[in-house]
Image (cartoon, helix red, strand yellow):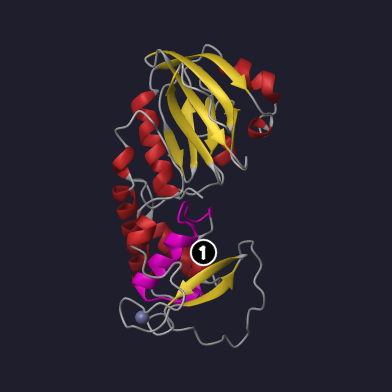
Amino acid sequence: MPELPEVEVVRAGLARHVLGATIVGVDVLHPRPVRRDPRGPEGFAAALAGRRIEDARRRGKYLWLPLDNGDALLGHLGMSGQLLVQPRDAAPERHLRVRLVLAGAAEGRNLHFVDQRMFGGLSVSAGGAELPTEIAHIARDPLDPDFDDDGFVARVRRRSSGVKRLLLDQGLISGVGNIYADEALWRAGLHGERGGDRLSARQVRDLLGHARTVMSEALGQGGTSFDALYVNVNGESGYFDRSLHAYGRQDQPCDRCGTPIRRVAFMNRSSYFCPRCQPVPRARRTPTIAPSASPD
Ligand SMILES: [Zn+2]
């Protein structure tokens, strides 16, 4: 599953290769990836025809291309989505779902949306050039220069949920994801079940700094394909193999203290932590049983 740094690689690649391009043809080869567009596949194609791409932006893991009429092409890569800039005569990929034929600044190229599992998709957001209303509820991510550190610290400290759950709350902070959350918590020496209201401002700020560092490092290491025409994301960043201290390291010694890393179930996924560096918090007087997935 593409994590935020990989989506940022895609955004940067799109900014490089499709800015100023005019969309002169749209082929929807499977209806599912455009299911969120209320116009249907034909309306989706008609809404894009003749439009010029003005920018490439991102909020969390959503990408959007502002168009010259104030609308936007909004996309999410889901589990397996790819956006590929290809020569016009390139053979179609096996899982090619939507093809945009480009002219103008990207004459002779196509933009391909390829998605095997089709959890991702594309839609046209009416008036969404500045910020699509469909994603306006999603908070900024820690790599966004306008992220509000003080506001984040204050909001975390008002919540009693476990801090890992808060890191994954897209209304509070976007794009952190399960892997980066575990890594940031390991670096901060915090257990993910520690309540936000049990943390000092310094601890939350420190954790945010670690999340930012982990994601920046991944972005740096994922940048090798930046200059290629082939704009790719496959969820297989080399970062994951080389630099992880907690995630996926069950029973391996902690890089800091040698204690075996422990894995526990967490929201249909897993959490990895060092039981010594990240001690399990003491139970509250009023224990929270089976916390729900919704915000407090
Ligand atoms: Zn340790």
Query: Residue at (40%, 30%) from the top-left corner?
Result: 14
137 sits left or right of 107 in the view: right
Q: Amino acid at mark 1?
A: Leu
Q: Quadrant of residue 150?
A: bottom left
Query: Residue at (46%, 51%) from the top-left corner?
Result: 175
Give 293 or 78, whichever is nearer the viewer: 78
Give 89 or 73, whichever is nearer the viewer: 89
How many labels, in total?
A: 1
Query: Residue at (41%, 76%) from the top-left corner?
Result: 190
Q: Residue 91, position in %: x, y?
A: 50, 22
Instruction: From this view, report whether residue 153 is shown above or below residue 139.
Output: below
Question: Callout 1 environment at 10 Å: few (<14), some (14 to 19), or many (20+)?
Answer: many
131 sits left or right of 43 in the view: left
Instruction: From this view, report whether residue 23 is shown above or below residue 241.
Output: above
Query: Residue at (50%, 56%) from the top-left corner?
Result: 172
**Mark 1 residue's CB less than 8 Å from ligand 1:** no
Q: Which residues are magenta?
A: 170-198
Instruction: From this view, report whether residue 276 is shown above or below residue 222.
Output: below
Quarter of the render that holds ligand 1: bottom left
Q: Quadrant of the C terminus?
A: bottom right
Instruction: Please say whether residue 39 is visible from this viewpoint.
Output: no
208 sits left or right of 138 in the view: left
Identify the residue position indicated by label 1 in the image: 166
Q: Secondary structure at mark 1?
A: helix
Q: Residue 102, position in %: x, y?
A: 46, 16
Residue 272, magenta (yes or no): no
Residue 189, magenta (yes or no): yes
Q: Residue 271, position in %: x, y?
A: 51, 70
Instruction: Please say whether residue 177 is visible from this viewpoint.
Output: yes
Q: Residue 97, position in %: x, y?
A: 60, 29
Q: Quadrant of residue 213?
A: bottom left
